[in-house]
Every structure is written in structure tokens, then in C-alpha cells.
Image: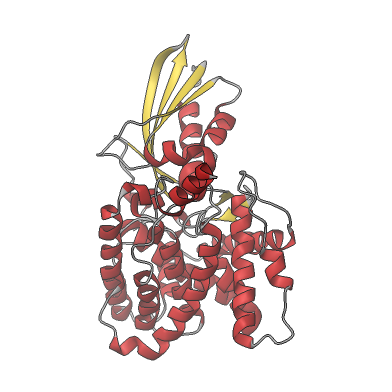
Amino acid sequence: MKSIRDIYKIGKGPSSSHTMGPERAARLFRKEHPEATGFRVVLYGSLAKTGVGHGTDRVLREVLAPLPTEIVFSDQMLPEAHPNTLDLFALQAEQIVASLRVESIGGGDIRIAGRPDNPDDDPYPENSFAEIADFCKWRYIKTLSDYVELNEGPEIWDFLAQVWAAMKRSIEEGLSAVGFLPGGLNVQRKAKLLLEQELSTEVPQVRECRIICAYAFAVSEQNADNGTIVTAPTCGACGVLPAVLRYVQETRGCSDEQILRGLATAGIIGSLTKRNASISGAECGCQAEVGTACSMAAAALAEIYGLNLDQVEYAAEMAMEHHLGLTCDPICGLVQIPCIERNAVAAMRAMNACNLSYFLCGSRNISYDMVCKAMRETGLNLAHQYKETSEGGLARIYNRRQKRN
């Protein structure tokens, strides 16, 4: 299994698969073909359907500038390829001199046809939660964060410290910003409003919800405004994990070291899900993005609270189980509605999943490996309209209403 460094990427929104991935592919292709005098990029599937809303065409032109670049939004179906596939062509005198097919598989990662991954880059021999749990029990390793340090080395803590600093910055920047998000939907920033709108009769449960949601809104709104965030595991789900970590640090007085251990545990859950299911909304719907983020956050909380491995697994499993079937239907292809509110709701669900795991762990029937398998099966069977194409669900209903009015 790959390093948790692949789960946490510091970069600009709004989409890891639609902006970060294509940007990475374009930089690689340009570096490999300095002889090119122009480029053509053909986008397929979800990249074609929602590329404009996600800024795919914009980021490709920025990377390949000042050379002329033609962006083609293709209707061609590629049944054997990932839904986020693009073909890059290098041109000389308008003639194709080289080409490359790239799949943007989620979280900013890309897969290139004919170029296998290097297995030497995978620090974890274990590829399922069951294997990890067995190894930890055999070696008397009590926490997933210790398991991470064993496999990745002590330098992983410096990396996670950078991740946590970037997460905190995205919260602060989001809480201080006002106005409307770009894209034409006139979505108002609400993080600052949520943080400051304290009720005189507010009970602790309502305050907890308001503060956690304010933090989740802050990060998600930064993402929607092309701000710098951390994929956790994607841009579209970037608000869940930092929101719960910031809140628990403030209310429980957790040290940064404890938070980093939570991030390490969350990274393992994200890596397992990425390997055995998917973190791509275009492949498996929003259950793969926000569902995974919720599982990561629930597991991180369980680690920070000192729960055992079984309880950590149950927290992660429960969080994912109750996102099964969640569709990805962004209005106008923008990472705004329903994405921003969905991050806030998932943050609260992570808190609940962690709390329930403490009381109910001994009675569980479903493992995390099972729910991962179910999520992938469910996602692959979802109709394509509900997998980041903006052709179904809220996106279709909204467009239909707009046309009628």
C-alpha cells in the first residue's frame, strides 16, 4: 500500500481529480516534449462534462502557456478507461508528434497507460485493515499511528506537521473571508457567519454543531474559491478532517503531537480506501470522497481519544457505511452545491461515529474491509449521471428549473 503522503497534498482547489490531476499530467507532458510548438488536450467522461465548472480547461491552458493549446470536450465514451481520462497531443506545425493518455484517478494522482507504478514506492506490505490489525497484534503495536511511524520512518511527523499547518491556515483564511464564491451560482460564504452567530439560548450541542460546521465551511469555501487546501482525501472533501481536528484540539486541549497522530491514522484509512475501493467521485460517487473523508475523521478522533484498534476500525466503518450510495451531482459542475454543506454534515457524522464506536464496538458485524468492498461495488453500479457529470440529481433538477423560469 502506498504512503499516506499520497493522501495529503497541499495545493489549490477546487478539484483534485479535475484540476490537480490534469495539471500534473500537463506539466509532465510538457517537460517530456520541449520540442512542441502547441498542444491539444481531449477530455473525456466527467472531465468533459464538468471540466469548465471545475476549471480543468483553465488550469491546462495555464500550465501549457504561452504555447497555443486547444481543449476538446469529447462526447466519446471510453468504457475500459477511468471516467476522468484525458489525451494530450504535442504539435509541431499543427501535426501531432507525440501523445499520452492519462487517467486522473482521484486525490490529484494520475495513472499513465503503459507506465506501471513502482512497487518500491509502497512502504506498507499490508493491503487491508485485517492484515494491518493482525500485524499490529503480532508486534504488540497498539495504535495505527505507531504502525505508520514504523513503516514510514520518523520523518513522517515533519510531513504531517506541514499538513496540519496548511489545514489550520485554510480554516483561518476561510473564516476571515466574506462575499460570494465564483462561478455564477451566487453562493454566499457562510463560515464567518456561522462562527459569529451565537444564540443567547444556545445549548452546548448546538454550539458544537455550529463551530464544527463553521470550520468545515471555511475550508470548503476556500477550496471552491481556488484557495490553498489539503486533499483529505480529495479537494471536494477537504473540509471534514480539519474541522473535527481543530474542534477537538480547542475543546480537549490536545497537543499538536496528538493531532498529528490522528492525521497518521486518518491517512491509513484513506490509503486503504484508495487502494481497495476509490476516492474518485467520477468513479464511485461522493461516497468515495466525503464518505472516505468521514471515515478518516472518525478514525482520527478514535486515535486521539485513545480508543483501541477495534474501536478505531468500527468508527471508520460506521462512518463509511452510512454514506453508501451517496451520489456526486454538483450543480453546474462547481464544487459548491451540495459539496460545501455535505462536508459540514459529514464532520458531525464523524463525531457521532467515533462516539458510538466506544459504546458498541463489541456488537459489530461489519468490518472496514467489507464496507470498502461494498462502497466500490455500489459506486461502480451507480448510473453515470450520478458520478460527477452534472447530468442527474440536484444538478439536473436545478438546470431544469432554471430553463423553465
State the residue at coordinates (29%, 39%).
Answer: 81
Quick check: 76 left or right of 59? Answer: left
380 up-or-down from 152: above or below: above
Quick check: 271 left or right of 372? Answer: right
Quick check: 346 left or right of 229? Answer: left
Q: Residue furthest toward the front?
A: 405
State the residue at coordinates (30%, 50%).
Answer: 383
The image quadrant where one finds the C terminus is top right
Question: In this view of the protein, which residue sits in the foreground, 191 or 149?
Answer: 191
State the residue at coordinates (34%, 62%).
Answer: 325
52 up-or-down from 199: above or below: above
Residue 370 picture quarter:
bottom left
Q: Inspect this view and state whether residue 44 appears.
A: yes
Image location of residue 135, percent across then percent down: 29, 74
243 up-or-down from 202: above or below: above
State the residue at coordinates (53%, 55%).
Answer: 337
Q: Residue furthest toward the top?
A: 93
The image quadrant where one finds the N terminus is bottom left
Image location of residue 340, percent across then percent down: 56, 59
48 up-or-down from 157: above or below: above
Image location of residue 38, percent across then percent down: 51, 18
Question: In this view of the protein, which residue sits in the foreground, 327 or 157?
Answer: 327
Q: Inspect this view and state whether residue 253 appears.
A: no
**Colouring style:** secondary structure
Image location of residue 310, percent across then percent down: 34, 82
Residue 203 picture quarter:
bottom right
Q: How many marks?
A: 0
